[in-house]
C-alpha cells in the first residue's frame, strides 16, 4: 500500500515563526502536492512538484514556499506564520505523467496547524 | 474557470437509508470526475472515478454516473452503514491544468 506520512498531526506555532511541514511518501511517486483544507472551502492547492527540485505554484501560494531535494520528501515552509494560516494541511502524491493514474492522489493524514 | 459544487451538509441518515450526495461541475472541455472520501482522522482516499460521459464509477456499494448533459456526478448508495460516516469530496481533473479541483465536501452522519 502507498503510504504518505506527515511529520506532525498537530502543531501550535506563534505568529512570525518559521514553520516546516514535512511529507514523505514511500512509493517512488514523481508528483507531490500540498493542500490546505478549510471548512466550506474544500481543498485548495498550495504548491505541487512533478520532479526533484521542481515546483509549481497552485492556487494559493502566497505566504508559502516548498522544497523538494529528494524524490520521497516534499516540505512546506511558512516563512513567517500568520493567524490566517491556521488550517489543516494535507500532503498527497501520485504516479508520474506517463501513467494512466496520475489523477489518483494518495493523501497523508494531515497536519492541523494552529497559529496564535 | 473549472469548478465543482457540492450540496452542503451535514447529511444525517439512519442506517440502511438511501444516500444521494449531489455534485455538479463547470469545466471547459471534458474532465474526469472523482469522489474522494475522508474518514475521521485520516487523509482522503479515492472512492470511485469516471473518465468519460455516461461512465459509471462504483466501489464499496457507492455509485456515480458521469452525466454530461446535466454536468453532474451524484454519489449514491442504496443502504448506508454507520461505517460510511465521513466527509465526501467531489473532484474533477483536467489534463490541461494538471491538478485536481475539489468541491467543498459533504459530511455524512449515519446513525444506528
Image (tube, coloured by chain):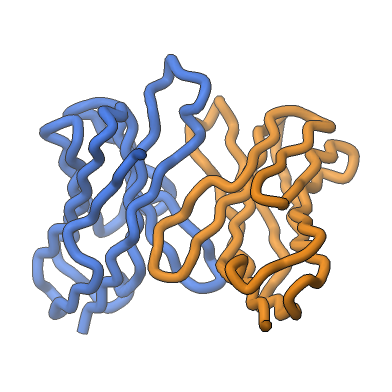
Chain colours: A blue, B orange
Query: Which corner quadrant holds the N terminus of chain A?
Result: top left
- Of residue A52 and residue A46, the one placed in the foreground of this image is A52
Residue B50 appears in the figure:
yes
Q: Is residue A28 above or below residue B111?
A: above
Query: How far across and down, in percent of the image, does residue A17 sit?
Result: 9, 71
Q: Please tell me which residue is depicted at 24% across the width and 51% down the height of the picture.
A: A5
Q: Is residue B3 visible?
A: no
Q: Residue at x 63, y 73 (%)?
A: B82
Task: Count how many numbered circles sit on residues in the image.
Answer: 0
Question: Furthest-right residue in view?
Answer: B69
| Front-lying residue, B14 or A26 | B14
Please give left or right for residue A69 compared with residue B52 in the image.
left
Along the horizontal axis of the image, is B89 left or right of A17? right
Q: Residue A9's spot in the image, x, y percent? A: 24, 68
Residue A101: x and y in percent read: 50, 27
Percent coordinates x, y for residue A24 in the rendering: 20, 44
The picture quadrant where one finds residue A90 is: bottom left
Q: Which image quadrant is residue B96 in?
A: top right
Between A24 and B70, the residue placed more toward the observer is: A24
Q: Out of B51 and B45, give the one closest to the viewer.
A: B45
Would residue B49 be found to the left or right of residue A79 on screen?
right
Looking at the rendering, in which quadrant would you find the C terminus of chain A?
bottom left
Q: Furthest residue to the top?
A: A98
- Residue drawn at point x = 74 percent, y = 54 percent: B75
Residue A42 versus residue B65 in the image, above or below: below
Amino acid at each position: 500500500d502507498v503510504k504518505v506520512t506527515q511529520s506532525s498531526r498537530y502543531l501550535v506555532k506563534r505568529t512570525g515563526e518559521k514553520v516546516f511541514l514535512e511529507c514523505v511518501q514511500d512509493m517512488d511517486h514523481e508528483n507531490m502536492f500540498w493542500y490546505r483544507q478549510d471548512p466550506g472551502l474544500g481543498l485548495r492547492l498550495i504548491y505541487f512538484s512533478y520532479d526533484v527540485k521542481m515546483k509549481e505554484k497552485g492556487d494559493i501560494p502566497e505566504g508559502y514556499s516548498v522544497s523538494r531535494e529528494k524524490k520521497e520528501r516534499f516540505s512546506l515552509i511558512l516563512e513567517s506564520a500568520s493567524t490566517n494560516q491556521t488550517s489543516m494541511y494535507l500532503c498527497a502524491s501520485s504516479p508520474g505523467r506517463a501513467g494512466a493514474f496520475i489523477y489518483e492522489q494518495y493523501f497523508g493524514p494531515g497536519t492541523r496547524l494552529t497559529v496564535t | 474557470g473549472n469548478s465543482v459544487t457540492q450540496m452542503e451538509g451535514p447529511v444525517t441518515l439512519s442506517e440502511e437509508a438511501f444516500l444521494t450526495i449531489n455534485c455538479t461541475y463547470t469545466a471547459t472541455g471534458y474532465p474526469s470526475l472523482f469522489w474522494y472520501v475522508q474518514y475521521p482522522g485520516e487523509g482522503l482516499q479515492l472512492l470511485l472515478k469516471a473518465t468519460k460521459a455516461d461512465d459509471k464509477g462504483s466501489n464499496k456499494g457507492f455509485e456515480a454516473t458521469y452525466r454530461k448533459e446535466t454536468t453532474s456526478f451524484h454519489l449514491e448508495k442504496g443502504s448506508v452503514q454507520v461505517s460510511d460516516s465521513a466527509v465526501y469530496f467531489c473532484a474533477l481533473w483536467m489534463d490541461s491544468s494538471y491538478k485536481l479541483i475539489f468541491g467543498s465536501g459533504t459530511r455524512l452522519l449515519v446513525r444506528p
